Every structure is written in C-alpha cells, then in structure tokens.
Image (cartoon, rainbow, N blue to C red):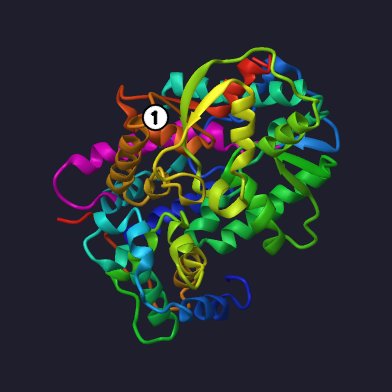
Amino acid sequence: MPAAGLRERVLEEAGRCAYCGFCEAACPTLRHGPHRGYGPRGRVEIARRLLEGLSKPTGEAVASLFTCLLCGACRVKCPLGVDVPLVVRGARSLYLAGVLGGRVGARPRLRG
Amino acid sequence: MSALDQVLSLMAEYVERTGFPLPVPKGFQYRWAEPLGLPRRGRVYLYTGALYQLAPYVEALVEQLERVEERPGAGIVLRLARAVSRVVDLSKIAVRPDPARVEQVERVLRSVAGLLRAAGVEYAYLYEDDLYSGILLYDMGLDEAFERHARRVYARLRERGAEKVITVDPHTTRALRQVYPEYVPGFDLEVVSYLEVLDEALGAGRLRPSASLGLRAVIHDPCVYARFLGIVEQPRRLLRAAGVELAEPPRSRRMTYCCGGPAEAVLPALARRIAETRMGELAGVGDTVVTLCPICLVNLGRAARGRARVVDAAELLARAFGAG
C-alpha cells in the first residue's frame, strides 16, 4: 500500500490549484498530447476528481497521469507553488494500489 | 490487467527478481571499475545506483519498442505487453546495448572515480552491492515494490559499513536524499553528489586544474538537479575552472527543459519529440552540449544526429583535472 496519509497529502495539494493555467506553457508534454489532460492543470484536475471520488479511472485519465515526465517545470511557473509532481506521482500510486477504483486499459498517444 | 499495468508489473517483477528493472548481464554494474582496483571496504562509498550502466540497456530496449511502434495497428504498450506475455521465461528477453554507448557510460564513471581521487577524497566502491536505487518504481507509483527494494538496498549499504555515499546522477541522488528517508525506517546515510564534493574541493583549493580545455559548450541542466536538488552552480563553477566557456540555452537553470527521457517507457514517440525540441534549442547555441545525467546523455545524444556533440560533464572535467 502507498504511504499512510498519501491520499490526504495529494488531495490537499491538488485542492490548492486555482486553475489559472500559467503552468501549461511550461509543460513539455501538453502540446504533443491529444487533450488538456496531457498538461499540468489537466492532470491536477484529473487527480483531484479521482481522489474525491467524483470520477472513476478511465483510459484517458490514466494515460494523462502516466505520460507526465515529473520534470517539475510547471511547479516553477505556478503562482501558488502547487507541487504537481507530488500530485501526479501520488495519484499514480493510489491508482495502482486500487484505491481509486479498478484498473483500466490505457493507450497513451500523441495528438493527431 | 491493462497493457500499461503489464509493463509496470514486468518492471516491478524484474527489480524483485534481479534488482534491476530490465534484463542485464550479471556484474554489468561494476565492470567499469575492474581496472581501477578501488578499495572494497570503507565508511564512504561511491554509490552509482547503476543508472549510468543501465542507460545503454534502456536505450536498446526503447529502440526495440520504437520498431514495434512504427508498425501499423495497436498501440505500442499493448503490442509490447502481448509480445512479453508470450515469453514465459522473462530472462529470455534479450536486450543488446550499443557497445560504444556502454563504453561511453563506463568512461564517465571512471572519470568520476578519477576526479574524486584527484580531489583527495578517500572512498571505497561497492562492486556487487552497487544496486539500482529503484527510483523508476517510485516515479511510476509502484510504492510497495519500491519500498521493499529500497529497504534491501539500504540493508546492503549498512552491511558494508556505509555512513556516507557519493552519488553520480540526479535521480539516484534524489532517491537517496529525498525519498529513502520516507520509506526506509531509520535511514541514516549522508548523501552527497560527486559534483558537490568536487565543488567544495575546488573552493578549498584541494582540486586544481592541470590543463585548460579551451572549449565552448552549452550546458543542459537535468530537471532533477535544477528543480529538486538545487544543484545548478556547482557544475558551472567546475566546468569554468576546467577552462570551458559555458553558453546558456534559452531555458536553463531552474527553468531548464526536460530531455524527454522519463516518457520513454510509456510512449517513446513522445520522448523523442521532446528530445527533438530540446536538442534544437541546445544546438542553436553551441555545437558541444554538456549534460550531467545518463538519461539526458542518451536521449539528447540520440536526438543530436550530427547537429552537436553530447558529452557528460565528468568526462570534460577529468581531462582538465588530470583524472582521465
């Protein structure tokens, strides 16, 4: 199982996002992906919805989380300093542990 | 189980069974050190975490994946998972690295070893106990497998009497400095990067250049050094002292741009595009690119295609500080 308190820590961090989108220009994967889930704001939103139980994992959600480089460029641009790599990595861990619902088939892909 | 899950499980299973995330020959991680006769016992150890040594194998595996990816039909991960599931014995998956790449990464490690000696640092080497840190498991969210592995690695380091380890790449440095303390009870090791050790020795006058390289190079900061560990100025001071005139790309230091490497296991085409973007940026500033991470070294090297020469900082430094 993931470390105790991981869910709370990830949720708290994701909950600080103001959805301003300043992070998006810094993300190396967003412009190559098929939708906004391939960028930091999308990934934080996906993680938050999964952790709050508002959504179940879908192939697109899982592909979004697993194509993140964890490079942290978004964190530098974020006016609130949201630790996006912590959110994404934590969401991966909780997903793989089955805490967010069942595993689904994911097909990471490029735009177009 | 989905295709992505199968790849992740495979990775975790390899680490569990062999200590490494993909098939590698026994002893591959300490072959570089054999000609050096480094001491086997001490309190300060050079711990490479085998990431430089793994890089040529990862490169070869990714190239195999790309060949599959170019065929029409199902997505890469699905195809790989299908190919893998047909192989009953996982050890039968052959990964053949480029011998020139193997030689390159081994040269980098011998350069680090020589530099530490030139700086008067006393250290021992772990040889067969120089185990992979497991950082990829952590990054992918395979926490359970990571935790088991990290505890084994730490136990081995303690058995060897380690009190301090000197690391050689950003990912292993981050694993031991920032992640192990959260997963390994009682973790108590001082973790320093060779760049920090050498920079300190340079400042204290214990490390002096014996030659000036007189070359111009553009520096590529690894994300993990620049944004997670704050190792930014140390390599610059060392390279300048070595007589390297440093050029900065448009995105550098904390604002550095990823080489794309971390995506290579999930979506190689994405990794390639990002490497292409970064290489274009770097090659626009200089024809020698200096990196500080094995993943950057391989990814940018592959994307260079004659536009620039991609070298590891350790190799340049070793030449200037008489540690070659």
Chain to which the residue tagged by mark 1 belongs: B
Element type at marker 1?
helix
Of residue B161 and residue B298, the one placed in the foreground of this image is B298
Of residue B311 and residue B147, the one placed in the foreground of this image is B311
Q: In the rendered image of this protein, does residue A39 appear above or below residue A80?
A: above
Which quarter of the rendered picture does the N terminus of chain B lie within? bottom left
Q: Where does the image place residue A31, in percent across and percent down from the top left? A: 26, 56
Q: Was residue B51 drawn as part of the magenta stretch in this picture?
A: yes
Q: Was residue A5 drawn as part of the magenta stretch in this picture?
A: no
Q: Where does the image place residue B111, in percent across and percent down from the top left? A: 63, 22
Q: Does the rendering let one see residue B1?
A: no
Per the picture, the main secondary structure of the magenta-coloured stretch is helix
Residue extent of the magenta highlight: B47-76
Kindly identify the amino acid type of the residue bearing the numbered disc 1.
Gly
Q: Exactly how many numbered labels are in the figure?
A: 1
Q: In the rendered image of this protein, does residue B200 appear above or below residue A44?
A: above
Which quarter of the rendered picture does the C terminus of chain B lie within? top right
Q: Which residue is mark 1?
A: B301
Of residue B250 and residue B168, the one placed in the foreground of this image is B250
Q: Where does the image place residue B136, in percent across and percent down from the top left? A: 52, 51
Please tell me how crowded label 1 is: few (under 14), some (14-19), or many (20+) other residues with Cα within 10 Å: many
